[in-house]
């Protein structure tokens, strides 16, 4: 007498431990292997980034003698790769206001590092399921 398995279920033999390495019987050919107990014990190393390379931005900087940015004293373009930038102002000139306007921006890149997997998952007691192929219901 043939009994159908409920939808979503399979008819299987189960073997644990040292018996799990044995071959499945011919009538039960669909093999699935795993562990009776498995815990994730792995972690990742911290991620980091090397110093930024290749980025560049340029800005126009203006200084004014009044508080309303109306009377310009000096103007210059500066870049993020400048180590020193100076503008000589007239003797006795007082600074009243200043502006800066971004002219261009090119993002840099950094070499990532870290993120390596450390450790191993904890697995105990191998288990093997030997299942019959799906049985077609009789016509």
Image (cartoon, grey):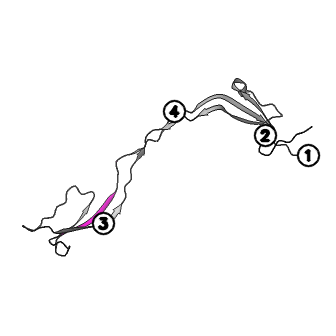
Residue named by callout 4 = 119
Q: Quadrant of residue 2?
A: top right
Q: Main secondary structure of the magenta part?
A: strand
Neighbourhood count class around disc 4 (C-alpha, 10 Å): few under 14, some 14–19, many 20 upward = few
- Closer to the camera, 85 or 125? 125
For the N terminus, give its image quadrant. top right
Give the image location of residue 8, x and y in percent. 77, 45
What whole-number distance in Å separates the C-alpha atoms at marks 2 and 1?
Answer: 17 Å
The tag earlier along the polypeptide, 4 or 3, is: 3
- Do residues under tags 4 and 1 come within 8 Å of each other at their CB atoms? no
Rendered view: 48 above or below 35: below
**In this rendering, would 41 be left or right of 86?**
right
Residue named by callout 3 = 102
The tag earlier along the polypeptide, 2 or 1, is: 2
Residue 62 on the magenta span: yes
What's the mark number on residue 138? Answer: 1
Q: Which residues are magenta?
A: 50-64
- Do residues under tags 2 and 1 come within 8 Å of each other at their CB atoms? no
Q: Quadrant of residue 9?
A: top right
Give the image location of residue 16, x and y in percent. 71, 27
Task: Find numbered disc 3 in the image and state the secondary structure of the residue it sits on.
Answer: strand
Neighbourhood count class around disc 2 (C-alpha, 10 Å): few under 14, some 14–19, many 20 upward = some
The tag earlier along the polypeptide, 2 or 4, is: 2
Q: Nearer the viewer, mark 2 or mark 4?
A: 2
What's the mark number on residue 10? Answer: 2
Task: Find numbered disc 4 in the image and state the secondary structure of the residue it sits on.
Answer: loop
| Residue 66 in sight here | yes
What whole-number distance in Å separates the C-alpha atoms at marks 3 and 1?
Answer: 78 Å
What whole-number distance in Å separates the C-alpha atoms at marks 4 and 3?
Answer: 48 Å
What whole-number distance in Å separates the C-alpha atoms at marks 2 and 4?
Answer: 35 Å
Neighbourhood count class around disc 3 (C-alpha, 10 Å): few under 14, some 14–19, many 20 upward = few
């Amino acid at each position: 007498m043939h009994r159908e398995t409920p939808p979503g279920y399979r008819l299987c033999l189960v073997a644990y431990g040292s018996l799990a390495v044995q071959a499945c019987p011919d009538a039960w050919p669909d093999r699935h292997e795993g562990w009776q107990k498995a815990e994730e014990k792995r972690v990742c190393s911290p991620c980091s980034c090397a110093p930024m390379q290749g980025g560049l931005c340029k800005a126009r900087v203006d200084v004014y003698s009044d508080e309303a940015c109306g009377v310009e004293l000096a103007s210059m373009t500066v870049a993020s790769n400048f180590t020193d930038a100076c503008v000589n102002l007239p003797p006795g000139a007082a600074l009243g206001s200043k502006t800066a306007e971004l002219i261009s921006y090119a993002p840099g890149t950094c070499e990532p590092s870290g993120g390596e997997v450390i450790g191993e998952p904890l697995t105990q007691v191998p288990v093997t399921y030997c299942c019959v192929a799906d049985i077609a219901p009789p016509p």
